[in-house]
């Protein structure tokens, strides 16, 4: 085992974009398209992805485009880097976003802490972190 | 419908280890220290116990099969719950006793997360995790921020949950955080995860807590005044975060409705109230869901002083998890029993309480409540 020197930055936590369950979401994110998982049998629409449909137990699910707009259900502002890899990003805002198609996303907001308001209109924005990882965000509409 | 349990099972022993930081002591060892104290309180030896229910520590230890080798006995009945919060554990004990699986059961929780430096903010490899949505303060803060927007709840009012617990803790020699804190002191603290301050979030501490529970018939032979289980209810949201208002935890309202309906009690019957609280948002949500304050009014109600020493509904008279210790609500139950016995320090003792309600949750996924009292 090797140990990084203590001055080295903590590696940023990144999602596993190769997981078969979620790969379709990350592929669309790289193309800056907002998608959600939809049940081919009953139409249940959701994020995050589920291995089978929790509404009807069908195992046939597809990623479908959803409106990249919605409103802010609520938000929090991290003033301490509880995840140490994000110490250069505080204060940062995380929002619970309800899209106009009824999908819930919990993501970083491109909104100043003082400007965040419950109920504000939002539109999807994208943060290309690496060649393979693009993270969904939402910004003021 | 739970209708047949009233007064049939009683708590006859309570005990705990010291609370704080104990490097080198395992969760299981702390469990044994608590069991030793609870058995002494009940006037029992371990040979007189035929059941053991353990509650896992957050790192996954403290299962019955890992406490057992230190317990040194193999009772005929043993079970483990992942997240007992004392409530779920107590309900399991009631079921085991009423069905004859066991007669006298020790319930125990042990934890060394503080000295083990457990990471409560470990990110998941998901979009949420990569967005920095970590720690219970994140989801709890979402619920409070929404509450503030919908109902005009202010920090000046909400802060009274943490301030009131500190006032109680100052009267509790076991409590870890006892330095005075006024509402102005609270408001001058910085946000941890806005809208929550550090003072709104549980401390992390090591320790163990145990109860001895037996049938009502046997309970009369024990040295202490029995404290009977008068009602219990549970609810879940194990299907997970699939609806907008998930952070408001409507499953708690279902549990509240069931315990009032099952027992015939109403909120006005409750003399002392206990709420397991990893954050003060739990206090806010539960005083509303259980009907002590109207929805939206919980923080303003708290600011009126009902829950403080001398108030008409003392809440978390031990100091709760914000000021006493981090025992997943187990010490709340110990305190409730001691208050009902009338045996806590005089400056903390509520005058002649007869009925207590203890409410807890497993994060955002389960809820439970128990009503206990001195009269069957």
Image: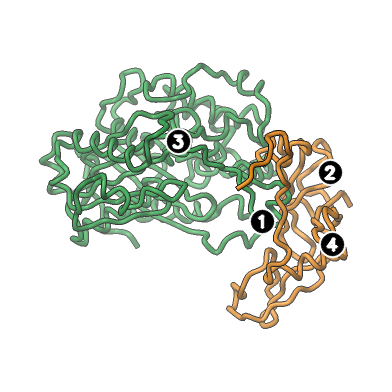
Front residue (pair B291, B13):
B13
Nearer the observer: mark 3 or 4; the answer is 3
The residue under the point 26% across, 36% down is B14
**Image-based side of B64 in relation to A135, left or right:** left
The hue used for chain A is orange
Q: The chain shown in green is which?
A: B
| Chain under callout 1 | B
Q: Kindly state the secondary structure of the residue where label 2 is placed.
A: loop
A27 above or below B188? below
Marks 3 and 1, Cα distance to the nearest angstrom? 27 Å
Marks 4 and 1, Cα distance to the nearest angstrom? 23 Å
| Chain under callout 2 | A
Residue A76 visible in image: yes
Label 4 in the same subunit as label 1: no
Label 1: which residue?
B125
Q: What number is the disc on residue A68?
A: 4
| Chain under callout 3 | B
Name the spot of residue B70 as percent of width and height, x first: 26, 44
Label 2: which residue?
A111
Name the spot of residue B92 as percent of width and height, x first: 31, 55
Do tag 2 and tag 1 residues touch (Cβ < 8 Å)?
no
Do tag 3 and tag 4 residues touch (Cβ < 8 Å)?
no
């Amino acid at each position: 085992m090797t140990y990084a020197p203590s001055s080295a930055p903590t590696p940023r936590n990144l999602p596993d974009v190769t997981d078969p369950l979620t790969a379709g979401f990350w592929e669309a994110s790289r193309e800056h398209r907002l998608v959600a998982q939809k049940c081919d049998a009953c139409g249940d629409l959701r994020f995050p992805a589920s291995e089978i449909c929790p509404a009807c137990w069908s195992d046939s699910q597809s990623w479908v485009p959803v409106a990249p707009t919605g409103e802010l259900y609520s938000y929090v502002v991290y003033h301490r880097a509880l995840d140490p890899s994000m110490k250069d990003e505080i204060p940062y805002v995380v929002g619970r976003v309800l899209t106009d198609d009824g999908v819930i996303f919990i993501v970083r907001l491109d909104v100043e802490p003082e400007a965040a308001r419950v109920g504000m209109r939002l539109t999807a924005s994208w943060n290309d972190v690496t060649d393979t990882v693009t993270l969904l965000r939402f910004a003021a509409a | 419908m739970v209708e047949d349990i009233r007064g049939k099972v009683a708590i006859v022993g309570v005990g705990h280890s010291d609370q704080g930081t104990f490097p080198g002591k395992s969760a299981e060892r702390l469990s044994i220290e608590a069991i030793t104290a609870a058995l002494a309180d009940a006037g029992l030896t371990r040979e007189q116990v035929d059941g053991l229910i353990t509650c896992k520590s957050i790192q996954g230890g403290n299962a019955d099969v890992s406490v057992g080798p230190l317990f040194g006995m193999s009772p005929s009945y043993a079970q483990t719950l992942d997240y007992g919060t004392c409530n779920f554990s107590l309900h399991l004990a009631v079921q085991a006793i009423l069905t004859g699986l066991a007669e006298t059961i020790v319930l125990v929780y042990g934890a060394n997360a503080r000295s083990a430096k457990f990471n409560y903010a470990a990110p998941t490899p998901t979009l949420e995790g990569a967005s920095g949505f970590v720690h219970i303060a994140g989801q709890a803060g979402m619920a409070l921020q929404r509450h503030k927007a919908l109902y005009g709840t202010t920090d000046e009012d909400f802060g009274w949950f943490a301030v009131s617990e500190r006032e109680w803790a100052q009267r509790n020699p076991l409590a870890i955080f006892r330095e005075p804190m006024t509402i102005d002191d609270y408001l001058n603290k910085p946000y941890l995860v806005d809208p929550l301050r550090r003072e709104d979030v549980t401390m992390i501490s090591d320790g163990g807590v145990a109860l001895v529970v037996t049938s009502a018939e046997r309970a009369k032979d024990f040295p202490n005044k029995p404290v009977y289980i008068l009602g219990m209810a549970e609810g879940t949201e194990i299907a997970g975060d699939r609806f907008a208002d998930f952070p408001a935890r409507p499953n708690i309202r279902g549990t509240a409705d069931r315990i009032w309906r099952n027992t015939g009690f109403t909120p006005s019957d409750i003399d002392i109230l206990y709420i397991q609280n990893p954050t003060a948002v739990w206090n806010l949500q539960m005083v509303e869901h259980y009907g002590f304050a109207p929805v939206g009014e919980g923080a303003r109600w708290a600011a009126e002083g009902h829950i403080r020493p001398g108030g008409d509904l003392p809440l978390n008279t031990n100091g709760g998890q914000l000021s006493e210790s981090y025992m997943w609500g187990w010490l709340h139950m110990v305190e409730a029993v001691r208050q009902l016995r009338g045996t806590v320090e005089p400056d903390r003792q509520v005058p002649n309480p007869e009925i207590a309600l203890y409410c807890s949750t497993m994060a955002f996924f389960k809820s439970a409540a128990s009503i206990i009292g001195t009269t069957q």
